Image (cartoon, helix red, strand yellow):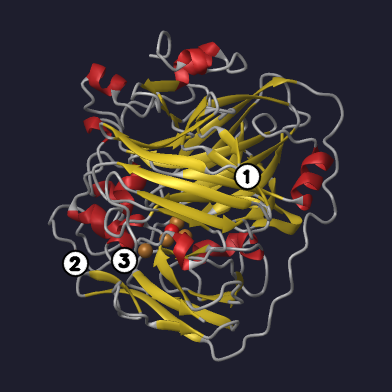
Amino acid sequence: MGRGDPLSAAVTAQTNQASRRRCLHLLAAGSASALLPASWPASRAAAQGALDWCASDGTFTQPLYVPGTEGWLGRLDVGPAPIAIRASARDEKLAFEVAAGNRTFANPTLVAAAGASVRVGLVNALAEPTIVHWHGLTMDTRNDGNGETLIAPGERYDYAFEMRNRAGLYWYHPHPHGTTARQIYRGLFGLIEVTDDDERMVRKALDLTPGSTELTLVLQDRRVGDGDRYAPAPEDELLGWYGCQPHVNGILRPYHDVAARRYRLRVLNASNARTYRLAFRRDDATALAFILIGTDGGLLERGLRCEQVLLSPAERVDLLVDFAGMAKSDFVVLESRAFDPMHAVPATSVVRSDETATGHGHRAAGAAPASLADGSAFDVMQFRIRATQSGSSPALPERLSRMPPLVAPSGDERPLRLGFAKGQWRINDRVYDRQATPIEVARDASETWLLRNYHTSAPHAMHLHGFQFRVLERETSPDQLAPLAIDARGRLTTDLGFKDTVLVWPGESVRIAIDFRLPYAGSQIYLLHCHNLEHEDAGMMLRVKVG
Ligand code: C2O
Ligand code: CU
Ligand code: CU
């Protein structure tokens, strides 16, 4: 791999040759080749027979893949010229390929300034319909890519929109209803980094450089082996597809060499179903506290010190971890701590009669031989302190950004019940129906929604297209959230920022405020759905008409 491939010549010298050979798998597919991490293709699996991949631990043996200015997840500045994206397949692997000048990308990280005009031409080179949705961005229906307009194989769709969001980490992924989970799992997703003055101020004050002291981490648990296939059993379709091996930027449990200073980590949970309870652990097993500086919709007003943070599918956290004062041989592990997954689906709804159907708290462990139980503890990656640095890290600016004040609700609270009935996950007892619009919001309204999850349910990562909302309150939260709550309203640190996805636990009610001011003429259709991709594909999604 790597050496002697047609694309190698085009790869500039700034990329480390050795690490590129180790980390990237080059797929020769004509001019638009895709670069994917080596651990994705089942090359090793094939060589080893690939039977017991979950037993092979592969802990901290491979370096973290850090995206550069080309290749997989490479940073691509969004300029005035349109970007041509090709959704392409190579065996089980899918990628969004882009050629820009003499650089080629797979799933580029689109870097755009707030206010920029973005033009993207998406060509579907897959053998099935697809469409791209811009997760977290303020968008009209025409550009939202909500799956109600699909592009057939060989066809093209042109997007043109203004970047209206605050600085933050957003992402893009396909949204063809019913096959969203499979397309994302097979590799179709990318990041969007929006920058603005606050962002520049924070980077300057903290001396942060993207790709070096500022790292983007994409978490995804995968079932390696069996050709890396997405083949959910009925239990997976019900509970979600849980992989057995935690990957960061496509690498199984990697390590990363760092200096004894502060780092910024911008984390996306791109997993189909898994929630992470992220924390840092030192050599002596004590926790290393960190500072949360941003959430789905960008920077918080002020940094918040925490010891752990929950990250459900599609959520993002922006955090600072400080290795200052550590010695050259110290290690810090980013871990996911144990929690009760609270899958309380009635046993009768599980088709298979094996150990998953025990009636209480289904653990996904039984769902397939190749899965790591939801809620179990595992290590995500390791930081190795390899260089010491004198002095302490620069002080955090008092104010990171300005968050507009909450707008008073213009009407009654809107209740949305999350639950399971007649074999399906539902919102207000309904499933997705293209012909129906159960939620209608008046133009420029400001609403309070009460997301109430039944006790006999599962955690649902509720996502709304097109708008960033605020979490006002959590009620009747499960006991395990108590150590994470930071105010009398039961909110967690991540609830204090702008959100587009919020995890609602069984028995819990979460009250959110949404400012529906619409910068577009005419009414628009958005979607509200669970971002557990199996729940979404099975119909846990409603249309929302605004204006
Ligand atoms: Cu990540 Cu409907 O979206
Ligand atoms: Cu979305
Ligand atoms: Cu769900």
Residue 79: image x %, image y %? 63, 42
Which picture quadrant has residue 468?
Answer: bottom right
Q: Residue at x 74, y 74 (%)?
A: 405
Q: Amino acid at mark 2?
A: Ser
**Can you tell which mark lies on residue 482?**
none
Is 227 placed above or below 81 here? above
Residue sitting at 85 percent across and 43 percent down?
395
- Mark 3 or mark 1: name the one nearer the start of the chain: 1
Residue 349 circle label: 2
Structural crowding at the residue carrying mark 2, measured as other residues with C-alpha within 10 Å and reported as few (<14), some (14–19) or many (≥20): some
- Judging from the image, what secondary structure is the residue with disc 3 in? loop
Q: Position of residue 525 (x, y in %)?
A: 44, 73
Residue 95: percent from the left, percent from the top? 38, 37
Choose mark 1 or mark 2, whichever is in front. 1
User: How far apart are labels 3 and 1 at the CA level?
Assistant: 50 Å
* Residue at figure coordinates x 52%, y 82% from the top left: 547
Residue 406 showing in the rendered view? yes
Q: Which callout, 1 or 2, points at the residue further toward the start of the chain?
A: 1
Marking on residue 344: 3
